[in-house]
Amino acid sequence: MTNDLQEAITHSIERVLKLQPTPPRSEASNLVHDIVSKIVPSDDLEREHIQETLVWIESGVPIFRMIKPNIPNKHLVSYFVLFDEVAQKILLADHKKAQLWLPTGGHVEINEDPKETVKRECVEELDCVPIFWRENPLFLTSTLTVGLTAGHTDVSLWYILKGDHQQNYSFDETEFNDIGWFDLRQIPYDKSDPHLARFIYKLRALL
């Protein structure tokens, strides 16, 4: 399928979605609203993203991805950052599609609890059972994607998991070229998520 055809199909589906009457919010959307409302912003940009996200959820539009890669064009993601607190290192993955070193994570399935997304994706991407460093997401961002699937918006909840940089983690080679541990003082910000530095700042404030 050519890019032009894919784009035409995407626009057609989005037009149909916009014509549908706005349904009442689902229990899953209410849960996400509750999760987002409990995140304490660390700066003005996060405060703005949180408020925009709450309004987006309250509008009743679909918030979960329905069709890969970008329908609806704005949808929910769960990041999970493996953190070795003793060594002060985090795990990042060299993501094939984004062409960046990013935290592991994935799209929240329709009506899925974002925390369950973390549990599912951790097994799928790193073949390990997650242990949460904190139960609720620390951070929220709204980001226009780049790379091979550029042009849609990911609203990302950033969870933190306990990790061990000395453990040999396997990884999903269909998703990632490689994975690596990075000291909090030596993170490749220029090749990562544009909000990663802000996340690290917020994380370090808890230590």
Image (tube, helix red, strand yellow):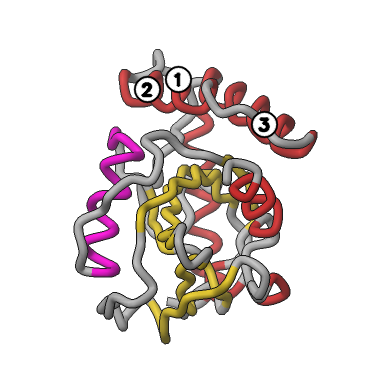
Around disc 2, counting alpha carbons within 10 Å, would you say few (fewer than 14), some (14 to 19), or many (20 or more)?
A: some
Is 88 on the left or on the right of 129, as rendered? Answer: right
x%, y% of residue 170? 25, 79
- Based on the displayed image, in which of its 4 quarters is residue 146 positioned? bottom right
Q: Amino acid at mark 1?
A: Asp
x%, y% of residue 38? 52, 22
Circle count: 3
Q: Which residue is mark 2?
A: 31
Residues under numbered marks 1 and 3 in contact, where contact means CB atoms less than 8 Å apart: no
Q: Amino acid at mark 3?
A: Pro
Disc 2 to disc 1, how far (Cα)? 5 Å
Q: Which residue is mark 1?
A: 34
Disc 3 to disc 2, how far (Cα)? 19 Å
Residues under numbered marks 2 and 1 in contact, where contact means CB atoms less than 8 Å apart: yes
**Magenta residues, as a range?**
111-126
Q: Which mark is residue 41?
A: 3
Q: Is residue 95 visible?
A: no
